[in-house]
Amino acid sequence: MVSTQKDPVLAVLSLSGGNDGIHTVIPYANPLYRDFRPSLSVPEEQVLKLNDEVGLNPSMGPLKKFWDEGKLAVFLGIGYPNPSYSHFRSMDIWHTCEPDKVGTEGWLGKVLADLDPNKENVLTGVNFGRGLPRALAKEGVPVASVGNLETYGLLSGIQGEERNNALDVFGRMYAPTIGTGYAMDYIRSTGIDALKGADILATAPHTYTSNVEYSSTDVGRYMKNIAQTHLADFGTRVLFTTSPYNGFDTHAAEATAHAALWSDVSDTVETFFADLQDHGKAENTLLFMFSEFGRRIFDNGSGTDHGAASVAFAVGDKVKGGIYGEYPSMERSDHIEGGNLAPTMDFRQVYATIVEDWFGLDPVPVIGGNFEKIPFL
Amino acid sequence: MADQDIALMAHLFRRAGFGASRDDLEAYAAKGYEATVEELLNPETQPGVEEDLMLRYNQSFRESNQARDQQWLYRMVNEPRQLQEKMALFWHTILCGGNTKIDSGYEMHRMINMFREKGTGSFRDLLLDLSKNPGMIYYLDNSESHKTAVNENYGRELLELFSLGVGMDEQFNYSEDDVKACALAFTGWNIAPAYPPFPYGRSQWQFRFDPADHDDSVKTFLGETGRWNGDDIIDIICKQPGAARFIARHMYDFFVADEPPVPSWRQTPPRDMEAIKTLEKAYFDSGYNIKAMLRALLTSDFFKSEDVRFAKVKNPAEIVAGTLRLVGDHREIKPGLWEIAQECTYMGMNLMDPPTVEGWHTGYEWIDSGTLVERVNFASEYLGQTDLPGVQSLVNHLMALGESLSPAQFVEGSIDLVGTLNLTEDTRQALVAHAQEGGDLRHGTEADRAEFTRRAGEMFQMIASTSEFQFG
């Protein structure tokens, strides 16, 4: 292993679908909030107040505890210029830091390349869930992507000595070849990485013991897998998972759906850190949560449509708790594109901080420019 | 039978269907390429899968969530009308609706059936039916879009993902104002009853146009001004060059060779512009007819070309259904198919539940270390089961090659029969080296037959686990 147990580790939970920032960090003291959200505003007495202006949604009780302990950073007005309202495109922008063209390399893929330039460890980055998010994609960077940690392994249908023979042939058949094109090269290197990573990862559930119980949702299951992998000391530095796709796309029936989503996420974050704490592995862990965009300022009767600026969160022992950035103005004259919050913070500012102050790497090539850091670490 | 005829027929069935057994390929090759294409294009000339049989064994196959994946996989494997079934999958990967939200096996069945029945007709009719499909209305919140409170979800996705795409030839195909006009035109396109299945249980939804909830104002859409309703919007969409380009590119990507991801289509030109122009011409010449485009595609030189054979990464449904068709399992209704249908999900393609309205990322993006492990494990496990009729047939074909096979002959014969003709030289060598450890193969005695069969099963397994097997 190239790393030690004290190396900084980043866990990312992507909240897919466009989390309603206004309904998450509620500007309860702003009268415009209630004017524009007739069907969806939370009564002031139920808001979990962070200061005289904003507070958390009542479903986020466990996260409020992290706030009280000074371990929760809240990023307000986060987004990027000329927002895209397409789920796919906007998520891609967050993943690649390329707002103007379609990027193929992810910011975390570049981080992994810098952390492990000689590819000594195929498990430096691990994703949990179906398919690899583009954030982790970079040519030549191995990232294990695990749908089910319990059954992960190659040619698992063949038993005994024959399986070893088969795996041996597999290794030779997936050796790099010349002139067969990108897709074939990619698949072969993926096969070799899978071969190496699978046997290591398969041990994680067996060495894991815990006193906590994660929820049985996908978020709970994958955050547990993140803890299992982190606790197994494979030298994994970046762990990524995505909440069920487009779950936060609350065009309709938002009040109940959003509360259920955040209740699950908040409970899981609490369980996750309790688990790490029990094993003395919380200190070097930073959790970052974001969504591809926020939602329209005006509710549509039962939900909200795609919007621009939203909120994001960082949680961890090393996080300097507090509110970062300005809540975007809700005044009509300040709305962009027919009723959206104008971003006041660029997500690349947060990324720059993570890359430089958490991983000790040069952020400029990773995020494609100079962005003023946010002092939350 | 000339090998190149078999190879071309295998290519046709990998693309226009879910693969075919060796015996079927030989029968089709005898019939001829053009005749086979016409048979595929005209499903009514074929008997369909026996629905009453499906109903007898699985009474809720149209309704239950559990049955929906299972019955679709059964159709992919057994439907004689292979292109019709492939087109249902084609449209499902583009005109995406998902059960996570719709939460109704019946509505999903109805949506996929719409693709099955209308998928090779007029694109205009298909978009119109789609806009009236209750599952879609609910999926993209048009049921929540009202004259006084417009929900733009359907209006936007109709343009971005279902008909035009963001742009082509570096130009944008529509503006934000067009999205708003489109969404306004579809106000009042709703379902009755529009309430969710809880707490009173499911009720069958029906399309209902509510004139009182429809915005009847004058709108400007893609440069045309009028009192547009939803069907007018679809008429305007269908005559755009962008619509022709959009379908042509999707068709090329699905049937011919992997294109770059859809969001980059505005900036990135097609891989084969001449092919795209051929398909665009068929679209306009035929009055937006999909079958005419398919005929132009399947009979074209660019489709038959050796250059595009194995140029596509198989999608998970193709891996799963194609493997079952090759090994000859689940040719009749029996338990266990639901569990197999879940394999598609493990490989990243939860049928009837695409990750987002954008659908699945295709091409090499199907593959990551997790999904590759699933693909390798699934296909190799089935190809190794020598008691399955399809595998037995492959073994028999292999034995028919001669009384004694050298390791090299054995490997070449196995590759040909499994149909993975794109194996690179280094992969062949690795397989031959492996086969040489066991020496020559004979099947004269009972004991030799058993050993031959065991080694053949093992060889098929190794071929199914190659990187080349991932291409179709």
Image (tube, rainbow, N blue to C red):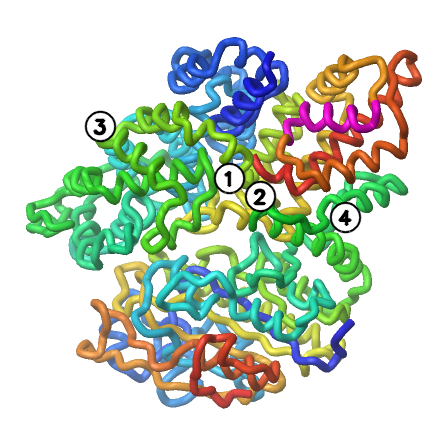
Residue appearing at x 53%, y 59% in the figure: A133
Gap between marks 4 and 3 measured at Cα: 51 Å
Indicate the amino acid at tag 3. Asp
Front position among marks 1 and 4: 4
Residue sitting nearer the eye, B45 or A101: A101
Gap between marks 4 and 2 measured at Cα: 26 Å
Residue density around tag 4, few if under 14, some if 14–19, many if 20 or more, within 10 Å: some
Seen in the picture, residue B204 relative to A151 is either above or below; the reply is above
Which of the chains bears the disc numbered 3? B
Under circle 3, the secondary element is helix
Is residue B23 part of the magenta span, yes or no? no
Tags 4 and 2 both on a single chain: no
Residue appearing at x 35%, y 67% in the figure: A100
Position of residue A355 measured from the top left corner of the image (x, y, whole percent): 55, 80
- Residue underneath mark 1: B351
Gap between marks 1 and 4 measured at Cα: 31 Å
- Residue underneath mark 4: A171
Residue density around tag 2, few if under 14, some if 14–19, many if 20 or more, within 10 Å: some
Q: Earlier in the sequence, mark 2 or mark 3?
A: 3
Residue A17 falls left or right of residue B144 = right
